Amino acid sequence: MSARSTGAHRLANDDDVLAGLGYQSVLSRRMGPFGNFAISFSVISVLSGCMTLYGFGLNTGGPAVVMWGWVGVGLMVLLLGMSLAEVTSAYPTSGGLYYMAHRLGGPRWAWVTGWLNLLGLLGAIAGIDYGAATFVGAFANLQWGFVPSPEKTMMIFAGILLLHALLNVAGVRLVSVLNSVSVWWHLIGVAVIVGALTLAPAQHRSAEFVFTHFNNGTGIGNGLYVTALGLLLAQYTFCGYDASSHLSEETTRAQISAPRGIVRSIWVSWIVGFVLLAGLTSAIQDYAGTQGSATGVPPAQIFLDVLGADGAKALMLIVIVAQLFCGNAETAAASRMVFAFSRDGAIPFAGTWRRVSPRTKTPVAAVWLSVGAALVLAAPSLYSPTAYAAVTAINVIGITPAYAIPVYLRLRAGNRFTPGPWNLGRFSGLIGWTAVTWVVFVTVLFCLPQVAPITATSFNYAGVALIGVLLLAWVLWITKGRRSYQIPSLSSATAHSEFEGVI
């Protein structure tokens, strides 16, 4: 890897770089390198993703797959993140993935990438904040005997969305501060949780159990297949690090800070998540009881069994606050994607969503659209948990392929791609093709059946969601996109060459 800032890769003024890519700087550039790292770290949020799917992991492979799957998936995601960081260094814009795809492959590649990325980000807000609402409901149940019906959970969810909208419209400076606090909250929070579970005078599982115990509650007989399915816990958690790219127009030294933010958020989360999962798993008192917890949240049952009600509630609060930080950061990333996609004419009523507040230099309308869309996406949960699962599947099934498209196009461009100051040098091809192959594998994996027998309730709708997103993108392209969507021409002779291709 290289992050040279001299010679051919001398860092230019951020606004000059952006102008060279075709855009005038209109957002407030008040986020530093740590803030850029913090937003991606907050969106990954091991205290959100790991906690939400921990029960899935216990059922689909058990501790052995949870732990070793985290190690293996983390390595592959790190390679993908490094490849994406290299392209981000060359094209540091709020549009992120779709802008890269356009410069390297043309408008149709960009259109598909943009809609996959956008719907994935909006699905992420819905999934993160609805997950936080369920944890709030579980805490309220422990504290006050509150019974979280679907209607009550939806009201909590709407309140969380409103909170995140208000925080984001206040300006990027507040968002950056909150993300910086979020980093320390996650690091200290994981230390407190693992420390409390480890030091409590309860029985602990052996290292052999933590790293080798296999459990299959899926009804599927093939152990290798179940092991592959169990990787989804880690892959779900390792999403959202493109936030560093989406906030690059508000980051200083963006050509270096944004790619570093992507890579650092992944490897720090990799380490912290491993410690968290090991601490949780070693503290399991009753495996079946944890899986079938009356709280509906297996980690909460571990807290209860080890620390009692008061200790469990304290640790639940740590998790809830971390989830709120995560949802707030995701709202920031999604709103910048809405802003950028509207700026290039890709979203209906684009003139509204690309407006920037003259006071805060924040895309206020894009923030409200992001949380409003998340509310609509979660509405089916009032009637069908299966339907809601299908909608939120758009998060992972949409955003994971979107990560790989710019990387693939960069590899296809070969020497025609002009790297930025942060690049992988001679390792770019090896790392990039490994990452793209991984994404193809895991995307197919997300679409396969996860339990047996397959019923209307247990059917995995992720593949349907992916087809739906691609059909939506195609319909919007032929009805509007090919006429309205256009990114600006490069305005600097020293900027990067534009490559056109076919999809």
Image: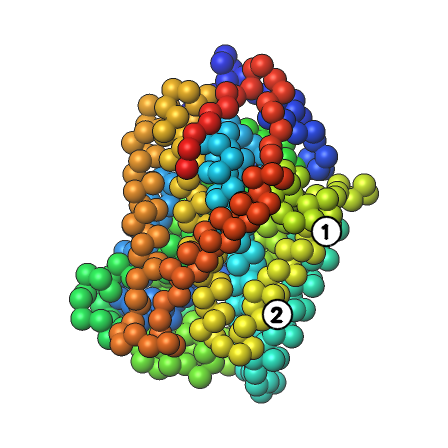
**Residue found 51% across the figure and 81% down from its top:** 309
Instruction: Give the residue number, with chain letter if any, for mark 2.
Output: 157
Whether residue 501 is situated above or below residue 367 in the rendered picture: above
Image coordinates of residue 184 in percent, x first then y, are 56, 52
**Residue found 61% across the figure and 80% down from its top:** 151
Please name whichever residue, 451 or 478, is drawn nearer the observer in this view of the structure.
478
Image marks 1 and 2: residues in contact by CB distance under 8 Å: no
Instruction: Give the residue number, with chain letter if any, for mark 1.
Output: 365
Whether residue 460 is situated above or below residue 329 in the rendered picture: below
The kind of residue on which mark 1 rests is Ala
Please name whichever residue, 393 or 249, is drawn nearer the observer in this view of the structure.
393
Circle 1 crowding by C-alpha within 10 Å: few under 14, some 14–19, many from 20: some
Residue 381 visible within the image: yes
Residue 213 falls left or right of residue 156: left
Depth check, mark 1 against mark 2: the one in front is 1
Image coordinates of residue 450 in percent, x first then y, are 31, 67
Residue 263 falls left or right of residue 35: left
Task: State the quadrant of the N terminus.
Answer: top left
**Residue found 53% across the figure and 30% down from its top:** 91
Q: Earlier in the sequence, mark 1 or mark 2?
A: 2
Q: Farthest residue toward the front? A: 479
Instruction: Kindly state the secondary structure of the residue where label 1 is placed.
Output: helix
Q: Farthest residue toward the top? A: 7
